[in-house]
Amino acid sequence: MTEQHSPWAQPDTQVVLAPVGPAPTIQRTAEPPRAAPGYQSGRVSGLGVPPIVPPPSWGTGGGGGDDDDDPVKRNKRILKLLTGGAIAVVAIGLVVVLVSLMTGNATTPGGLFDRRAEGPSDTRPELARRCPPPTIPPELPPGGDPAPAGPRTVDEESGISYKEYGAPWGPWDNVWADQGELKVTYRTGQHFVTEPDYNGGSDYHATILSGHVPAAVNDGMVLDLRCVGDQIAADVRISFYPKGNQLEQISAKDLTLGGRPGRLIKFRLHFSQPGLRAKSELVSIALVDLGKPEAAILYVSIPDTHRQFDYIADEAPESVRPV
């Protein structure tokens, strides 16, 4: 039997391969070439294929030209910039809000968040602003009681008439305007001089004067008589009497005057002024709601040097009638 040998059992035969041409030249950076993984230095494959060299690394700074050509890297860089800017804006906003809250500017008028348009200015008269009418006005009687017989002082401007007194009372021939909040002007009434030229230039008077104060800019309204009366009394005190006067309250009541809703306030003012014999004065203020845009006022003042006329502080207001 012929002995058969495996073709792989033949002794090694040297196989010479024809050169396939020079290896391609690879442009490299200053970094020396490195062998591909799995190959040791100085060895090549039997086919003569050069080792694979990875592209040069530009580091992680993103400053190379290849990053500008790579849309993924470029978008990541832009996203980082935008994220950083947004964080900075939010941080600044939080600082501003905290400072505003600590200084009170976030809630006080004119502060950081107060940018609402201002409403229209209040054009109502002073009396209407200080003493607004009640939400549900009461029923008012129509018209008023007729005037009793006898001499009358008629104040067409104020809308009332009242009893006229004889001597020593005479017609009022002056104009007094108070310096208070309501600026009531008294043009009509009666008076007489109780102390002439008491301070080297002025006379002191007993008075029965009428006036009015605008209460509304539209048709008739119901007034808060308590509020209006208190304000008029305060205005009289600071306008016609020495500073530092002391008030002695006597009475304050709602009542009907001439068939119309009214309020009567009585008090005595105590004071002292060089050259003036009077040390106090009885005052009554009658307020009448005529159902018109003006409230009618009757102001009576009797110095303590002429107490015999104190009764007029009640009688004159009770004689008031609408005209």
Image (cartoon, helix red, strand yellow):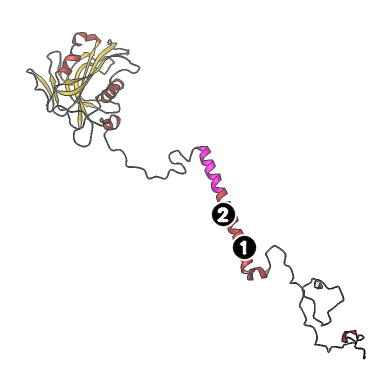
Left or right relative to 128: residue 27: right
Between 208 and 123, the one lying in front of the other is 123
Seen in the picture, residue 200 relative to 44 is either above or below; the reply is above
Answer with the quarter of the image where residue 33 lies.
bottom right
Left or right relative to 67: residue 199: left
Q: Earlier in the sequence, mark 1 or mark 2?
A: 1
- Tag nearer the camera, 1 or 2: 1
Residue 113, percent from left and from top: 45, 44
Query: Do residues under tags 1 and 2 come within 8 Å of each other at their CB atoms?
Result: no
**Tally of numbered tags:** 2
- The numbered mark at residue 219 is none
Name the residue tied to disc 2. 86
Q: Which amino acid does label 1 sit on?
A: Lys
Q: Give the residue displayed 78% in from the left and 81% down from the top.
A: 25
Question: Which stretch did the figure color magenta?
Answer: 92-109
Name the residue tied to disc 1. 76
Q: What element carries label 2?
A: helix
Residue 32, percent from left and from top: 81, 72
Left or right relative to 314: residue 54: right
Residue 165, percent from left and from top: 13, 15
